[in-house]
Each structure stands twice: as structure tokens, then as C-alpha cells.
Amino acid sequence: MGFDRTVTGHGDRCPGAESARMSLQEDHLMATHAVRAQHESADHDPLGTVAHGARGAAEGARDVAGEIVTRLPGAAASTRDVVGQANVQMRSSSNETLIAGASLSLGLAIGLLVAGSNRLLVVTALIPAAAMGATLMERRSRELAE
């Protein structure tokens, strides 16, 4: 799923990501075993099996949605902190550093695009270039205004 690679702004693993992933895997295994057991019984009702499977899927979706809702505020706060730190670092960097970073990010995005990567991944690679470019343009407009 990728949750185990999520990090917070301080380089720590995201609290509870591993347990959430394990919980989701256990829920999936339990639902799979329940459906198989019911399917393998000799006197099963196909309509009942479908209804039971749909009920199990709805319960699983509800549980996952509940987990997401409980973790969302922490993830939003962590993201806000990381973006704030990145903004402070960009504002304190030299123009040359910003130009190099924007060029590297733009080159990565173009390489991903040429390689046929997912468009969302290409757009994500452009975010740092846009942020650094905006900082450079802001500095330039301030210099011209003075």
C-alpha cells in the first residue's frame, strides 16, 4: 500500500502506519476466509453468499474510512509543518541554488514524461520547480520595485 514509507517532517515513520497496514491485511484475510468458507459449504444460498460478501465489503470500507478520518488531522498538521519548513528554506536560499533546484526538478519531470510515467507523477515532480520558480519571480519583482 505504501503507508510504511510515509515519513513525517522530522524523518520519523508515520505513527501507526505499520499497524494500520497490518490491520488492513488482517481484515482482508478474514473477509477472504469467511467468503471461501461460505462458498465451500454444500448447502449454501448463492444470493445469501453475495449479500454476505457485500455486507463484509461495506463493513471493511467503513472501517478503513474510519481509520482515515482518525489519522487525517495528524497527517494534515505534519504536511503543514513540512511545507512551512520548505518555504523557510527556499526563502533563505540563494538565487543560484533555487535555479539549480528548479532545473533539476524540471528535468526530472521531463524525463518522467518522456519515459511514459503516470501524469500524476509528472505533475508531482513539477511542484518543487513551480515553488522555486515562484520564489525567484517574487525576488525579481521586489528588486524591480526598489
Image (cartoon, rainbow, N blue to C red):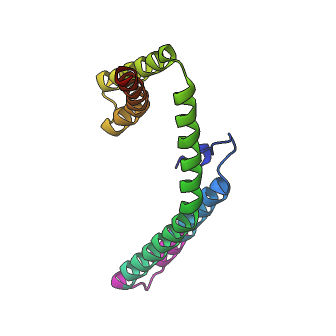
> Residue at 54% across / 49% down in the picture?
80
In the image, residue 62 sits, relative to residue 91, either above or below, namely below
Q: Which residue is depicted at the point 40% across and 21% down?
A: 143
Residue 85 percent location from the top left of the image: 59, 38
Residue 132 locus on image (x, y percent) = 43, 27
Instruction: Give the camera-side residue of 33 and 5.
Output: 5
Overall secondary structure of the magenta stretch? helix
In the rendered image, the vertical position of residue 1 relative to residue 113, given as above or below = below
Q: Is residue 33 left or right of residue 126?
A: right
Q: Residue at x 44, y 31 (%)?
A: 128
Q: Nearer the viewer, residue 48 or 4?
A: 4
61 is higher (above) or lower (below) than 81: below
Expressed as whole percent of the image width and height from the top left, the position of residue 66 reads: 53, 71
Q: Does 109 sit left or right of 13 as displayed?
A: left
* 137 over 29 or under it: above or below: above
How many numbered marks does the figure carry? 0
The percent coordinates of residue 7 (x first, y second) are 62, 44
Looking at the image, which residue sits at the far front?
146
The reply to whether the magenta stretch includes residue 17 is: no
Span highlighted in magenta in the image: 32-47
Quick check: 114 left or right of 28?
Answer: left
What residue sits 56% from the left and 67% below the top?
67
Foreground pick, 95 / 46 = 95
Say which quadrant the C terminus sits in: top left
